Amino acid sequence: MKSKNGYQGKLIYNAAKKSFEADRDEALAVLSVFFESPMGVAEHTGFVNEVREHTKKLAEAEEALASLEEHFGWMEEI
């Protein structure tokens, strides 16, 4: 039988992981629009700044995911 604390820990782990995955996916979606559909951003004046901002968000989310999985990936087994 799983301990109550283990179950709660897994819920917290999963919520954090999904949050970082959502941040990553959002950044990827925005960057995809910028790079693959330039017509959609033709009137966007801060194009480079937006790309920089979302690239940083992507890197932060990927780094956070990797760190979470490296240190607490064992939570997947609970």
Image: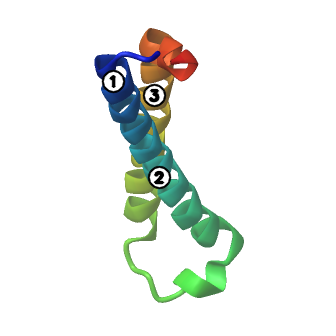
For image coordinates 49% across by 56% down, the residue present is: 27
For image coordinates 57% across by 63% down, the residue present is: 29
Q: Is residue 35 left or right of residue 48?
A: right
Mark 2 residue type: Ala
Q: Is residue 1 above or below residue 47?
A: above
Q: Is residue 38 above or below residue 76?
A: below
Mark 1 residue type: Gly
- Classed neighbour count for the residue bearing mark 2: other residues with Cα under 10 Å, few (<14), some (14–19), many (≥20): few
Mark 3 residue type: Glu
Q: Can you identify the residue that label 3 sits on?
A: 63
| Element type where label 1 sits in the image | helix
Whether residue 55 is visible, yes or no, is no
Q: Is residue 37 above or below residue 39?
A: above
Residue 15 x/y as whole percent: 38, 41
Residue 23 numbered tag: none
Front of the two marks 1 and 3: 1
Residue nearest the viewer, comparing 51 with 61: 61
Q: Can you identify the residue that label 1 sits on?
A: 9
Q: Can you identify the residue that label 2 sits on?
A: 22
Q: Is residue 75 left or right of residue 4?
A: right
- Classed neighbour count for the residue bearing mark 1: other residues with Cα under 10 Å, few (<14), some (14–19), many (≥20): some
For image coordinates 36% across by 18% down, the residue present is: 6
Front of the two marks 1 and 2: 1
Q: Earlier in the sequence, mark 2 or mark 3?
A: 2
Q: Is residue 35 left or right of residue 9?
A: right
Q: Is residue 68 above or below residue 46?
A: above
Give the quadrant of residue 35.
bottom right
| Element type where label 3 sits in the image | helix
Residue 62 x/y as whole percent: 50, 34
Residue 22 x/y as whole percent: 47, 52
Residue nearest the viewer, comparing 23 with 46: 23
